[in-house]
Structures are given as structure tokens and as C-alpha cells.
Image (tube, grey):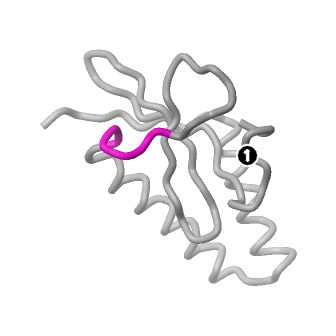
Amino acid sequence: MRKITLRYLPIFQSDLLEIVEYIRDTLQNPVAADNLLDDVEHAILKRSENPESFEQYRSVKERNLPYYRIYVKHYVIYYVVIPGGTKIMEMRRILYNKRNKDFII
């Protein structure tokens, strides 16, 4: 079994922090914010077992690497797999699923 290295872009971290702060502070639901963090972590770890075995995201932009998606509650995680000796699963964005993602990513 090949090892996968997980990497998180700063914009992914910023997206996630913004979502968690909104749920925790604006909606005043810290339990839901914690649950979302747990669900995101669990989904990423589970997907890292075989990150390329899922449908590629059909982007309107031409990309060097194909994007993949993970659905977590009302959010979508976008990631790429960077080939090499040790593959890198790089989390690029996490967005609310109703947003215009073609414009954003």
C-alpha cells in the first residue's frame, strides 16, 4: 500500500476557519462547528486511502492536475493528487455547495 502525504493550502485553511467561525459565532452553535471539523477530518482521512478512485471534477478551466471532490454535509472539499515517489493529496478549497464554484476555483 502506497503512502499518501496530506497537504493543506492556506486558502483551504482560511475557507475552513471562516466556515467554522460563522457556525460557531454568527449561528452561535459551537457543537455544530466542532462536528463539522470532525467530519471534514474523517472524510479527508478516509479518502486518502484511495484518493484517485473517484470521479474527477469537470472544471471549466484547463488545469494541470484534475480536481476531485469530497462532500461533507453542505460543503465540498476540492483536492488534487500530485504524483511522485510519495503522492500528495493537496486540499485546495472547501466551499458551501450552493456557491458558484466555477467562478471561485
Q: Nearer the viewer, residue 50 or 11?
A: 50
Quarter of the figure with the C terminus: top right
Left or right of 101? Residue 92 is left
Residue 69, percent across and down? 51, 48
Q: Residue at x 48, y 32 (%)?
A: 80
Q: Residue at x 81, y 68 (%)?
A: 22
Within 10 Å of disc 1 (Cα), the crowding (few <14, some 14-19, many 20+) is: some
Mark 1 is on which residue type?
A: Lys
Left or right of 37? Residue 61 is right
Residue 14, percent across and down? 73, 46
Q: Identify the magenta region.
A: 51-56
Residue 98's place in the image compared with 57, above or below, is below
- Magenta stretch, main secondary structure, is loop
Q: Secondary structure under badge 1? A: helix
Residue 87's place in the image compared with 57, above or below, is above
Q: Nearer the viewer, residue 22 or 76?
A: 76
Q: Residue farthest to the left?
A: 1
Q: Residue at x 34, y 42 (%)?
A: 51
Residue 61, percent across and down? 68, 25
Left or right of 61? Residue 56 is left
Residue 19, percent across and down? 74, 61
Q: Residue farthest to the right?
A: 26
Q: Label 1: which residue?
A: 101
Residue 20 magenta: no
Residue 40's place in the image compared with 90, above or below, is below
Rendered image quadrant of residue 5? top left
Quarter of the figure with the N terminus: top left
